[in-house]
Image (spheres, grey):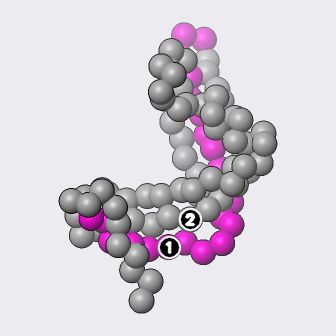
Amino acid sequence: MSADGLIQYDLKATVNGNIELFDLWRSATKVRLAWTTGQDGDYIYYGDAYITSLEESAGLNEVATFSVSFEGDGDITKALVDTANLTFVNNND
């Protein structure tokens, strides 16, 4: 899996950003990835992975961006979204 994003350097202490990604990559920490629409009844997919690459770039007077790649570690789980309970229902039957 890979992702791209914009870097915001003036983050408040309660927001995670590219610095936390760098720390996770450098320490080879396993992370949990999830992707979904967030709508009730839709599926959420999630699994564990390691960051295999992290790049930052910015041209002169341009917005800074990052690219990150992950390699999966184990199975991907599929579940139903249940926003009323702020949880999801495991659907591995």
Q: Residue 66's spot in the image, x, y percent?
A: 59, 34
Picture layout, residue 30 above or below residue 68: below
Look at the image and give the residue range highlighted in magenta. 60-82
Quarter residue 43 falls in: bottom left
The residue depicted at 56 percent of the width and 22 percent of the height is 64
The residue depicted at 30 percent of the width and 56 percent of the height is 86
Task: State yes or no: residue 70 in magenta.
Answer: yes
Residue kind at label 2, given as amino acid type:
Gly
For the N terminus, the quadrant is bottom right
Instruction: Give the structural element (helix, strand or loop) at label 1.
Output: strand
Residue lying farthest to the bottom in this orientation? 93
Could you tell whether 9 is left or right of 28 in the image? left
Answer whether residue 55 is visible to the viewer in this image: no
Instruction: Give the structural element (helix, strand or loop) at label 2.
Output: strand
Return the mark for residue 66: none
Q: Residue 73's spot in the image, x, y percent?
A: 68, 66
| Mark 1 surroundings within 10 Å by alpha-carbon count, few (fewer than 14), some (14 through 19), many (20 or more) | some
Q: Residue 52's spot in the image, x, y percent?
A: 73, 50
Task: State yes or no: residue 72 in magenta.
Answer: yes
Q: Residue 40's spot in the image, x, y percent?
A: 23, 64
| Residue linked to disc 2 | 47
Contact? badges 2 and 1 (CB < 8 Å) = yes
| Residue linked to disc 1 | 77
Mark 2 or mark 1, earlier in chain: 2
Residue lying farthest to the right in this orientation? 27
Residue kind at label 1, given as amino acid type:
Thr
Picture layout, residue 31 above or below residue 90: above
The residue depicted at 54 percent of the width and 56 percent of the height is 33
The residue depicted at 64 percent of the width and 28 percent of the height is 19
Q: Main secondary structure of the magenta part?
A: strand
- The front one of 67 and 74 is 74
